[in-house]
Amino acid sequence: MPLFQLVTRRFLLAIPTVIGVCTVVFFLSHLIPGDPVDYILQDQTNPIDRLQLQKELGLDKPIVAQYIHYFNNLLHGDLGKSYYSHGRTVLNLILERLPYTLILAISSMMCALLFSIPLGIFAALKAFSWKDTSVMFIALLGISIPNFALGPALIVIFVLLIGLDIPVSGFVAGSSLILPTLTLGTSLMALLTRMTRTSFMEVLKQDYVRTAYAKGLQERSILFKHCLRNALNPVATIAGLQFGTLLTGSIITEKIFDWPGLGSLFISSIQSRDFLVVQGCILVIAIIYIFINLLTDIGYSILDPRISIR
């Protein structure tokens, strides 16, 4: 399928997906216990003020009417205004936080790829030896340890025990990325290591690889010219799909390290019942996830032209 037709088709398929996400998130967010008006007024329980604020926020209308109003604004590119941020629009709040989340996700992906591919190839070449077993054991640990446990553990090890001068809260400098990147990228690194090992072992069994060895080609040429590209096809697919997962998985990591990204905004908005911000965050993440899936499909077809993406 030509690239233009592929992009057009996926774009059209994405429209009902985004609509469905918006609808589900809208109604689920309104099921969160608590009233935003109570959180805004706090101890000010004047009934007149309460009714006036509900009217200003549009919360006095039936839930269906609120949804129609929200969806109509959404069609015009208006995500609404935050209940708490002095009238700032939801879009501005998201655009302010989104770069930090993307920086964290990209650095975690780069870290995972940097270590997982060499380790996976090494494990495949040393298959069923103690070296392979050691690498797979480390990978298993990386997958098994959740972010909410790994993050504090890294803080204790690197900052308290080793004594490294690394910021553990907020975005101070480039070094602020180190611990959040390791926390978020470790599970992905472990997954890609296992995937690379499996894929590379499958490629090594192919007839063309045995033929290349029989011709007397150098092993380096065989591994990197004949094997690597084919072995990385499934790895590239998983990596692309997991990038969207990094955006959602960053929520816990951002909370641990007080990272000023979209995840922190999402959590604080849930706690304060700022429905429009919650809906906006999930909508943006869903759109990015769909876009990443499209890029993954295109990249997969470039790596292996024999595959037709429909």
Image (cartoon, helix red, strand yellow):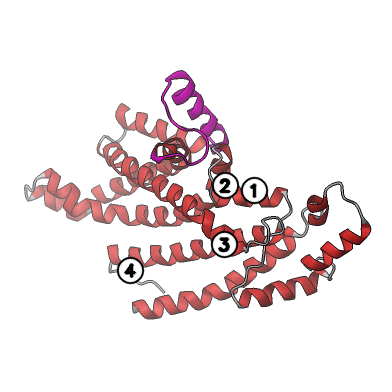
Badge 2 or badge 3: first in the primary sequence: 3
Q: Residue at x 88, y 63 (%)?
A: 51
Q: Residue at x 43, y 67 (%)?
A: 294
Which range is magenta? 145-174
Q: Residue at x 30, y 37 (%)?
A: 123
Residue at the top extreme of this rendering:
161
Inter-mark Cα distance, 4 to 2 = 35 Å
Inter-mark Cα distance, 4 to 1 = 41 Å
Badge 3 or badge 1: first in the primary sequence: 3
Question: Which residue lies under the disc numbered 4?
Answer: 307
**Residue 85, position as x, y percentages in the image:** 66, 56
Q: Is residue 8 above or below residue 62?
A: below
Badge 4 or badge 2: first in the primary sequence: 2
Q: Secondary structure at mark 3?
A: helix
Inter-mark Cα distance, 2 to 3 = 19 Å
**Residue 117, position as x, y percentages in the image:** 31, 44
**Residue 113, position as x, y percentages in the image:** 34, 46
Q: Residue at x 83, y 48 (%)?
A: 42
Question: Which residue lies under the disc numbered 3?
Answer: 92
Label 2: few (<14), some or many (≥20) within 10 Å?
A: many
Identify the amino acid type marked 1: Ile
Question: Which label is found at residue 251?
Answer: 2
Question: Which residue lies under the disc numbered 1?
Answer: 267
Inter-mark Cα distance, 3 to 1 = 17 Å
Q: Give the foreground label among 4 and 2.
A: 2
Residue 83 is covered by the magenta coloring: no
